[in-house]
Amino acid sequence: MGEQLADVGSTNAGRIWVLRLNVTGKVLHTQAITNGVGGMPSSTVGTDAYFGRSVSTDCGDIDGDGYNDVMAAAYFQDFGVTDGGSLYVLFMQADDTIRGFTRISQADGEGLDSLPVAVKEIGIGLALIPPRTVGDWDNPVDVAASSMNNRAVILFRLSVNGTVMGTPAVIQDGREGLPSGSLSSGDEFGRSTYPMGDLDGDGVAEISVGATSDDEAGSNSGAVYILFLNAGNNTDAVKSFLKITPATSGLNGVAPTGAEMAGGMLMGDLDGDGRPEMMFGFLVSSTSVVVARLGSLMPSASPTPSVTPSVSPTPSVTPSTAAVGAVHSAVRVGDGIGGLPSGIISGSDVFGLSLGGLGDIDGDGIPDMGVHSRYDDDGATDAGALYILFMKGDGTAKGYQKISLLDGAPEGGGPVGLDISSGSTFGRTPGRLD
């Protein structure tokens, strides 16, 4: 996970953390990666680079050395374009340090130097998905890196040595199959990007993109776009899209309005009814996330639900894929609601700004989630924290484990081992690295 405002070598250089956990979510081991730490050379990321803004552990074993690798964004780093941002492919080792890295940016020879437009802040959102086409290489993966500044998603193929293959696609309003007028000026499309799996069964994974200042459901209520992608590189990247807002049927009355819906990611099928669940986070005064059951069956799933729906599955959307991924019903999970106790989260914490799937940590057969609490004050002002939510099949939480400066160490195990400091906002975009 990321800590984008950490001062290591330079102010706001940023860093990422690898944590090893036990089945209760307690921290057994920590390893930082940044300037001069964890195998990264000193002065790799500079002042205000914000390394760790987005982190993805969905790379798999890119180079085939037996260890899964990581991608992390320094979305304000100046390479090729001022504040253009850069992406780091980190080749991991058994001890959770790196043996090397590849940098991707708009600088000459770094893979994104031929984009049709200069893009700022690449990597504010980051999603890695299976390749849209199969080629003559091992362990390929496609990267979707978003830019809120340009309201764009950069989509490209990653090679086994971490470099860009082929010509990247730039998804924007009126470009790469996203119809003109789909986005609104100032909607902050690109705030987040998450992988969504193959919702429509065409063999190609989807991505979600957050637009925090979208006004369709009310001023600054936000929205999440699910982009259904085409296979191959010879057609427009986007086949169609589904827009979800706090006013969408199934979310209306559950999701807050005016709270800037910041993003949404697929959780998996929590209750085994064939309908996947999705978690939504918010930017403003947030003390909860929203867990929604999507209205369509996953490919090859049984049509028989294991629970009785309480909300009509009819979505209030018009795109051609409205039946796929539309919201069926939803619950809130947060301070004093959805299984969590009262008094643990305050509105100023911005609980849920970023999210991450952590797999089944406790072994109960249900995937668990990581939720970032951006401005949590445990041990230091705005130091940040991570909440591990142990999920139930109905979308609520059966328990949680908080990881911060003051919480998360095993019983009798001493301090957690994190040297996070005031204002560093630890806990961004957590993911599982096996």
Image (spheres, grey):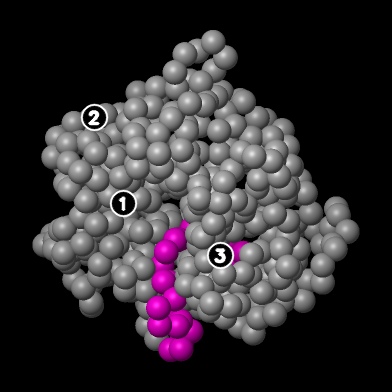
Q: CA distance from mark 3 to mark 2?
A: 37 Å
Q: Is residue 41 above or below residue 213?
A: above
Q: Quadrant of the N terminus?
A: top left
Q: Which residue is mark 1?
A: 73
User: Counting other residues with Cα less than 10 Å from the Cα at mark 3, is it few (<14), some (14-19), or many (20 or more)?
Assistant: many
Q: Secondary structure at mark 1?
A: strand
Q: Is residue 357 above or below residue 31?
A: below
Q: As rendered, which of 232 and 197 lies closer to the eye?
A: 197
Q: Main secondary structure of the magenta part?
A: loop
Report the amino acid beneath label 3.
Answer: Ala
Q: Secondary structure at mark 2?
A: loop
Upstream in sequence: badge 3 or badge 2 = 2
For marks 1 and 3, give the one nearer the viewer. Answer: 3
Q: Which residue is mark 3?
A: 259
How far across and down, in percent of the image, does residue 281 sit?
Answer: 56, 57
The segment highlighted magenta reads 178-203
**In the displayed structure image, the side of residue 378 where residue 74 appears, left or right:** left
Q: Quadrant of residue 379?
A: top left
Q: As rendered, which of 284 and 323 lies closer to the eye?
A: 284
Upstream in sequence: badge 2 or badge 1 = 2
How far across and down, in percent of the image, does residue 413 sit?
Answer: 50, 13
Residue at 51% x, 60% y: name it. Answer: 284
